[in-house]
Image: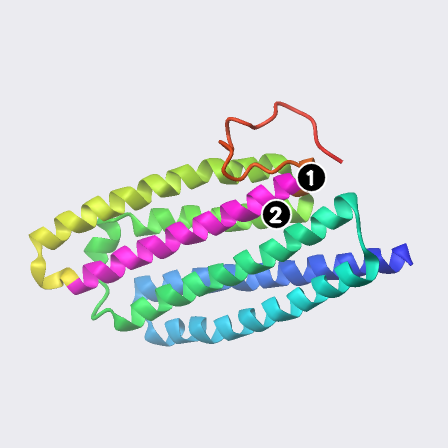
Amino acid sequence: MYRHFERELELLKRELIRMGSLVEEQIAHSLEALERDDDALAGRVKETDIEVDAMEIAIDKRIERLLALNQPVAVDLRLLIAALKMNNDLERMGDQARNIAEHVIQIQGVPGELINRMQIRQMADLASRMVRDSLNAFIYQDVSLAYGVLEQDDMVDQLHQQAYRIGAAYMREKPEDIENCLHMLSVAKNLERIADLATNIAEDVVFLVEARIIKHQGRLESRPDSGHGN
């Protein structure tokens, strides 16, 4: 019976990894669409979001079934709780990528100068790395990688704050381009939210491996020097 449960858990992990890969692709394509001013690619990002939504529902149902039929405890229970939260966070990341794609379609000529000044590419690269690292932290149950994601979140927050200051100055300098600037500020916010969601996954990895809840508790200050929970 337990071997069957283990197989089901492995299938669940594979589904989450597949969903994570699809969301990573969404994020990458939304940013490529922005830089290339490619409405067709932005449209494909929106179409992919429908697939991500369907995967979230299917994974939710699998987790509910595993909880109901197996009544797991200890690390198995933590895995299912973490997987349930991760599933939701990945779906929300897909929503943020879709939002970026929608802004691409609405922008009248992507302002390359503004993308550079607001450091959108740097912010995007960092947020994308956080998504990849949080997924790998889950796959390999690597707490060190998870804590690294938490540290990177502070860097994204700083870039986001800088983007708003630069955007405000840009709108005073070029009031004729206010609408495009507002779109870019929204893109920066979407990237900041993606980073936040990757941070959620990293926190759940710490919960899974160490049985510690670090959300809202001064994450980095509470980082242990060594040792893992069971």
Mark 1: secondary structure: helix
Mark 2 = which residue?
136
Please tell me whether residue 134 is drawn above or below residue 223 in the rendered image.
Answer: below
Amino acid type, mark 1: Val
**Residue on which the image places disc 1:** 209
The residue range painted magenta reads: 179-207
* Overall secondary structure of the magenta section: helix
Left or right: 92, with 182 as reference point: right
Measured in 3D between alpha carbons, the distance from the residue under mark 2 to the one under mark 1, in whole angstroms, is 14 Å
Q: Position of residue 67 (x, y in %)?
A: 76, 59
Nearer the observer, disc 2 or disc 1?
A: 1
* Disc marking residue 93: none
User: Residue farthest to the top?
Assistant: 225
**Vertical placement of residue 194 versus 152, above or below:** below
Q: As drawn, is 158 to the left or to the right of 97? A: left
**Residue 44 vs residue 228, the one in the foreground:** 228
Q: What secondary structure is marked by label 2?
A: helix
Picture coordinates of residue 166, whole percent (x, y) = 19, 46
Sequence order check, earlier mark of 2 and 1: 2
Check disc 2 and give the amino acid type: Asn
